[in-house]
Image (tube, rainbow, N blue to C red):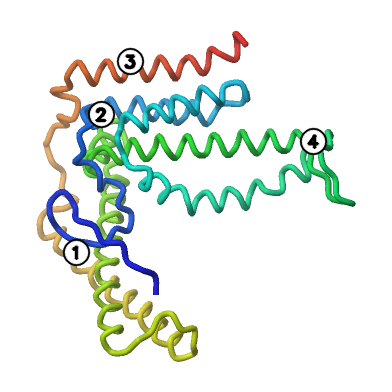
Amino acid sequence: MARETRTVTPRGREGVAILGIDRYAHLKSPVHRWQHPPKLLGLLSLIFTFAGVERLQLLPLMVGVTAGLYALSRLPFSFLWGHLRYPGLFIAGVVVFLPLVQGETVIVQWGAVAVRWEGCLTVVLIVTRFVCIVTVSLVLFGTAPFVSSLKAMRSLGLPKLLVDMALLTYRYLEELAEMRLRMQRAMTLRGFRGDRLTKRNLERLADLVGTLLVRSYEQSQRVYQAMILRGYGQPTTEQDQTWQGIHAYSWWGLVLTLVIACSFWIAPLVL
């Protein structure tokens, strides 16, 4: 069985870190001080700008901006590595063959296999953009509570249904992880050894997955009924106050971020 990663949230409740995207939202840093609505708008502009970078000359500047932003956030490197590792493996599997099939300038050849210069440059571009986009996304969602991020998205026009689905999905994954941990602990106390790949262990794991699916479905029904009883889905007259009380520090952060993003669009015209 996979080893659990236990964490203590800022509220003091001990749980299992599944997504853990906002586990460091309680830290103190210049990025944490940046209020979330303008921070969401500014960092999203950086993310879309990085996605459109095509010039290799801009990659060092993009890496520098990303590294500086992550350093200002004071998030630990382990947080970044933990969220880059598995998506990075997927990207590596996608781009590993590009140097073999793209381009005409051969730099290394072993028989019928040739590594081409243009393909290598494409790999560098794709990997750099991927790392920078994921890093900025972690800074965006890791320096504020997840609920605040969703409220800021709602204020920018994201449909309320999508916001509710995202919040319930995030919360439900944590509940499902806690349920899995309790069941796994009970199995271990009854002599289950998850490090042995046997037919009996596979049957027990299949039972575990089946039980989790049944319990999760039943719990989702109870949660939905409780939400309906509390008036979920009824029209409300509540006004959005997300953009009220934004201090000057946050507005200047938004302006600076937009200037940096615009510079990436202007730079190809100058170079």
Quadrant for residue 140, please give it.
top left
Q: Earlier in the sequence, mark 4 or mark 3?
A: 4
Q: Badge 1: how crowded within 10 Å, few (<14), some, or many (20+)? A: few
Q: Position of residue 50 (x, y in %)?
A: 50, 28
Q: Earlier in the sequence, mark 2 or mark 3?
A: 2
**Quarter that holds the C terminus:** top right
Q: Badge 3: how crowded within 10 Å, few (<14), some, or many (20+)? A: few
Which of pointers 1 and 3 indicates the residue nearer the eye?
3
| SS for dot 2 | helix
Marks 2/1 in contact by CB < 8 Å: the verdict is no
| Residue beneath the point at 44% across and 25% down | 65
Q: Which residue is mark 1?
A: 223
Q: Badge 2: how crowded within 10 Å, few (<14), some, or many (20+)? A: many
Spatial CA distance of label 2 from label 3 is 13 Å
Q: Amino acid at mark 3?
A: Val
Which of pointers 4 and 2 indicates the residue nearer the eye?
4
Q: Residue furthest top?
A: 270
Spatial CA distance of label 1 from label 3 is 42 Å
| SS for dot 3 | helix
